[in-house]
Image (tube, rainbow, N blue to C red):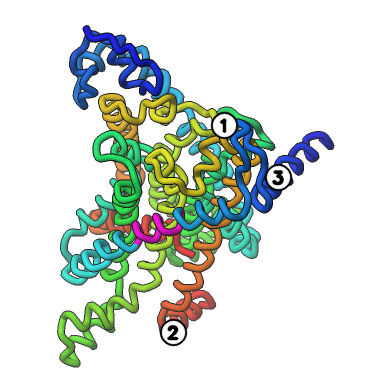
Amino acid sequence: MTGLALGFLGSFGDAFEFIFSGQQSPLARGEVGGLAQVWDLLVTHVALSAAAMALGLAIALPLGIYLGHRGRGELFAVAAGNAGRALPELVLIALFVAFVGTGFDNVMLALMILAVPPILTNTFVGIRQADRTAVEAARGMGMSERAIALRIELPLAAPTIMTGVRTSAINVIATATIAPLGSVLTLGDFILSPNVYGDAGVIAGAILVALLALSVELGLAALQSALTPKGVKLQRAAADTA
Amino acid sequence: MSVNLTLVGQSLAEKLAGDSSDQCIQDNGAFCFNWIAENFSDRYVTPTLEHLYLVGFSVILGFLLAMGMAVLSHRQRWLVPPFIGVTGVLYTIPSVAFFFLLLPITGRGVDTALIALTAYNLQIIYRNIVAGLNNVPVGPKDAGRGMGMTARQMLWKVEFPLAVPEIVAGLRIATVSTVAIATLADFAGGGGLGSLIITGSNITFKTNILVVTVLAVGMAVIFDILFLLAQRRLTRWQTAGESRGGSKRFGAAMARSRAA
């Protein structure tokens, strides 16, 4: 048991040494790891994920608002979410590598396809479930349909939409880990190339990817809370105490 | 038959092309049906069965653990937030990272993959069980209480049966997601359909990638349909108007599956 615990601590200790000061490569091709390389791969990882998320949002958000407001295409919005779940991330990357090509742009497109379904489904559901009395009141006050969608339904749907954005972001960051399969060197390279980085590099990569995902999740949770209208929060609090 | 003499840097597709008299394979075509017919039973059956094992085992184990946690937290309400928090953190860690964080503890192999996959299921299933129990209408609960039911009778005879639609919706989402995530299990040495992509240079071998896509997506769709049928069968007691809202409820369950 002690041996196991020591081995466990040893592996993680080596991993931290790998991150902060680097190590000799097992292939003896010089130093690997260290903060400079970690920073390089981290920047690529974040840039790739952010680009894919921006594209995904630009497609899914307007489409979801439009369909949700019109009450059309429920089958499509739900089916898109379903299909997104059923298509494995690894298979999607493999399809792009085999049929489209490798490199930053191609992998980014693959990740964008991954980002769209949860945002689309949640935007649709959120807009549809926006309080009907608030919408009717707005219509009675003579607001245009566009204003109703953007100024009444969208803020009310914000918590649900942000849940979808969080799902997408986590999924995209997780999948960017296997981007080295498509020749884009993200933090996943530490994990997927044990010959180059050694066992310490593998564990270090896993720690870094996990920390990145957790911090993005925490950041987006804070953003979600900030974007939730006060009225909706009060309503929820009232429902919780009832 | 063209024999490739330059073996250095040769991809698997090229190597196969060298070994194969099939022109389609030599050209790395996408729809080499003859090759598929010849190689399917040798190459694809075992990974498919491994995949089914990974999914089946982790969903069943995740369900049992989630039910245990739900029963516990139903009695001790204060346990709900920590349970949601812990399963949520486990769910947030990317699966590839999860596999390798477990390596120093559990080593390479199918066990490591099963632990990580079960952790993912746990979050989805537990959240849906809790939501299902919370959404049980007050009427039946009052009736049960009026009939003198104990807390345990209420839970097993009133609340769980009424929560079945949402529990099954959770199982459906968990199973379909796990079919997808289990393709990564081979990074942990767990085999499955992902091994057909990750091993060697198979990732550029078009016919192979298409076969894996059809197998993985097909498996997810079949599970999805089976759970949909189960959902319908288990909720027959609902009125026609209510059951038509099935897709809506599923949409809500999907939207909630990651709610904070």
Q: Which residue is mark 3?
A: A12
Q: Which disc is residue A195 wearing?
A: 1
Residue drawn at (25%, 79%), measured in percent from left and top?
Answer: A150
Judged from the image, the secondary structure of the residue bearing numbered disc 1 is helix
Q: Is residue B118 visible?
A: no
Residue type marked 3: Phe
Label 3 neighbour load within 10 Å: few <14, some 14-19, many 20+: some
Contact (Cβ within 8 Å) of mark 3 with mark 1: no
| Chain part drawn in magenta | A45-53
Query: Which x, y percent locates residue A58?
Result: 27, 65
Q: Quadrant of the N terminus of chain B?
A: top left
Q: CA distance from mark 2 to mark 1?
A: 53 Å
Q: Which residue is mark 2?
A: A230
Asked where in the image residue A145 lies, by quadrant, the reply is: bottom left
Please, which chain is the residue tagged with disc 1 on?
A: A
Please, which chain is the residue tagged with disc 3 on?
A: A
Q: Nearer the viewer, mark 2 or mark 1?
A: 1
Residue type marked 1: Asn
